[in-house]
Image (spheres, helix red, strand yellow):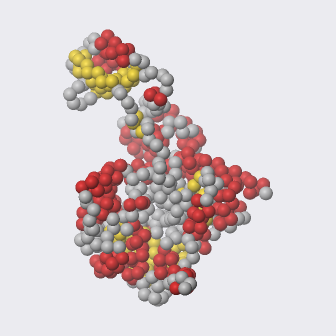
């Protein structure tokens, strides 16, 4: 329903695109980008938040470059479906843990992909075998630790600014 | 021997491009924020670059057919049909050129005899007028008006046509004005073009960058299709300026004439560029849509801000330029741009670089990130405040 509605209103789609590119864009800049006004932009953002189309704002951080130790693991989870609910009840339990950063139901060999964030490998490992694996409906887990991030959410972490300068003035 | 005296007379009499002069000045300065460039700020999409790299690795480094790879011409034909509803036979009605720029030169040299007239709507892209003169033609300049969003009207065309008119040159979406001709606008002039039996060269290089409506190609009017030479290329839509791949689509007799010159003067366009263009046509539609959306947002952003700080401009419907009036400042276009560059280190192009009709205007490119545009706008605003307080 929302998608149909959004399709009819290009402004909302453009607003979402602009925010996805830069979540810190000011309302006044967004109003200019959308050829609209600040009141309308604020109203639309509020509506999109209420409808859970805008679900939050994040900053992309390369933690490897800080003194803060962070560990991330991608866990493939096998699960058993329940009558009437499918995998929803298992998912509802998994998402409750703050260690779970992301959860997807997947096609393919495994039912879920879970992204876990922790401070140490031990912490993540403990979470997997003490919290995640015992959840009712979870049949098994495969844990892979992230060694180095190269690209997150479309942003290349090590990208150098172009060495090839454009001309300053050209036809 | 005085070498200069021995140069071709037309070359000697061709003035240095107004853009070139500005380029030289801007290049000597440090810390310049430029809104002066007529090319996308995106690098060519990776899948296109990757195909070109693969072609080099395989050793695909030979000449192609003079007309260009048949695979590319077939893709161009499909693309034009898919996007703009025009149909050209890839075997006989399309020639691939080294950028659309070579195409302009080929058409003028193939069609013009001494004294033939070419109607050019000004302000216009810098290359048209000199290339007409180099081919022995005479330019008839028609001044388009900002009040009419720099379009060509029926009356303007009627006033400009004479017995010597051979070509009407169109460029919509327009560099430098961003003006666009709609289907309804073309309907007004199609009958005249047919009746007067003149050719139309339609430089449609910015066709993909059309906002607020669908692009209309004048080649889609069947009654004059044989008189139309459609000119386009990969530079602007696919962010492929440096690859130099353009093309001409026209009646077979015309294509054979263009081929006559092209085969001797350039043999063929770069094979690597052609292979990259094949990939662009086959799999590049999504990238084009994304880049167009990005330009659309930047257009809105810059136009709203320019109007706010006092540089009045209409909302252009295409390309990636705005052409605001600077008449209220009391400065000429060149004075404005030189002072802006020297005082605030912002490079934009004087309207006069695009012909005398550009006096009182400047061309600002928004092929830059919103952050870059913002910095430039702040400096332009400060410049305007300083002018007023003098």
Whether residue B275 is visible? yes
User: Going 26% across and 70% down the picture, which residue do you hit?
Assistant: B65
Query: Residue A70 at what x, y percent from top left?
Result: 43, 22
Q: Is residue B207 visible?
A: no
Q: A50 above or below B129?
A: above
- Where residue B354 sits, quadrant-wise, is bottom right
Q: Quadrant of residue B12?
A: bottom right
Q: Is residue A146 above or below residue B299?
A: above
Q: In front: B346, or B87?
A: B346
Q: Residue at x 42, y 60 (%)?
A: B241
Most foreground residue, B15 or B172: B15
**Where the N terminus of chain A falls, by quadrant?**
top left
At 47% from the left and 58% from the top, the residue drawn is B39
The answer to whether residue A35 is above or below residue B119 is above
Q: For this view, does A133 lie left or right of residue B98?
A: left
Q: Position of residue A67 (x, y in %)?
A: 49, 23
- Which residue lies most toward the right here? B390
């Amino acid at each position: 329903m929302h998608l149909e509605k959004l399709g009819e209103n290009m402004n909302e789609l453009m607003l979402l695109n602009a925010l996805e590119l830069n979540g810190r864009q000011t309302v006044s800049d967004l109003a200019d980008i959308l050829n609209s006004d600040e009141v309308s932009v604020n109203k639309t953002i509020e509506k999109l938040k209420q409808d859970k189309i805008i679900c939050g704002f994040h900053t992309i951080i390369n933690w490897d470059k800080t003194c803060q130790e962070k560990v991330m693991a991608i866990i493939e989870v096998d699960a058993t479906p329940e009558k009437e609910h499918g995998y929803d009840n298992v998912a509802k339990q998994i998402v409750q843990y703050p260690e779970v950063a992301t959860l997807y139901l997947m096609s393919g060999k495994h039912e879920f992909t879970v992204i876990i964030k922790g401070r140490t490998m031990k912490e993540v490992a403990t979470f997997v075998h003490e919290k995640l694996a015992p959840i009712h409906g979870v049949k098994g887990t495969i844990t892979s630790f992230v060694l180095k991030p190269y690209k997150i959410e479309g942003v290349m972490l090590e990208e150098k600014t172009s060495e090839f300068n454009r001309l300053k003035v050209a036809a | 021997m005085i070498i200069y005296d021995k140069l071709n007379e037309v070359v000697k009499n061709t003035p240095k491009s107004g853009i070139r002069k500005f380029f030289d000045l801007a290049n000597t300065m440090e810390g310049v924020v430029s809104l002066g460039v007529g090319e996308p700020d995106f690098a060519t999409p990776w899948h296109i670059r990757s195909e070109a790299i693969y072609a080099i690795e395989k050793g695909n480094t030979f000449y192609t057919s003079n007309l260009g790879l048949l695979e590319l011409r077939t893709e161009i034909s499909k693309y034009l049909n898919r996007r703009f509803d025009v149909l050209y036979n890839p075997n006989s009605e399309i020639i691939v050129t080294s950028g659309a720029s070579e195409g302009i030169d080929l058409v003028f040299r193939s069609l013009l005899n001494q004294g033939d007239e070419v109607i050019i709507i000004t302000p216009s892209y810098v290359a048209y007028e000199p290339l007409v003169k180099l081919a022995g033609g005479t330019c008839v300049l028609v001044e388009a008006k900002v009040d009419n969003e720099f379009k060509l009207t029926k009356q303007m065309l009627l006033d400009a046509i004479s017995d010597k008119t051979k070509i009407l040159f169109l460029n919509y979406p327009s560099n430098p004005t961003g003006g666009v001709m709609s289907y309804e606008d073309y309907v007004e002039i199609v009958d005249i073009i047919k009746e007067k039996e003149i050719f139309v060269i339609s430089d449609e290089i910015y066709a993909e960058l059309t906002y607020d409506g669908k692009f209309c190609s004048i080649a889609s009017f069947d009654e004059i299709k044989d008189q139309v030479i459609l000119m386009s290329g990969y530079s602007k839509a696919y962010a492929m300026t440096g690859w130099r791949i353009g093309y001409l689509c026209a009646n077979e007799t015309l294509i054979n004439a263009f081929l006559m010159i092209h085969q001797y003067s350039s043999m063929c366009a770069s094979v690597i560029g052609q292979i990259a263009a094949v990939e662009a046509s086959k799999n590049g539609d999504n990238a084009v849509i994304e880049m167009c959306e990005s330009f659309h947002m930047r257009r809105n952003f810059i136009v709203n801000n320019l109007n706010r700080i006092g540089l009045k401009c209409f909302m252009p419907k295409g390309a990636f330029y705005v052409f605001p009036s600077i008449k209220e400042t009391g400065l000429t276009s060149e004075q404005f741009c030189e002072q802006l560059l020297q005082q605030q280190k912002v490079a934009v192009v004087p309207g006069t670089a695009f012909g005398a009709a550009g006096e009182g205007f400047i061309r600002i490119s928004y092929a830059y990130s919103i952050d870059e545009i913002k910095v430039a706008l702040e400096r332009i605003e400060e410049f305007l405040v300083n002018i007023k307080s003098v």
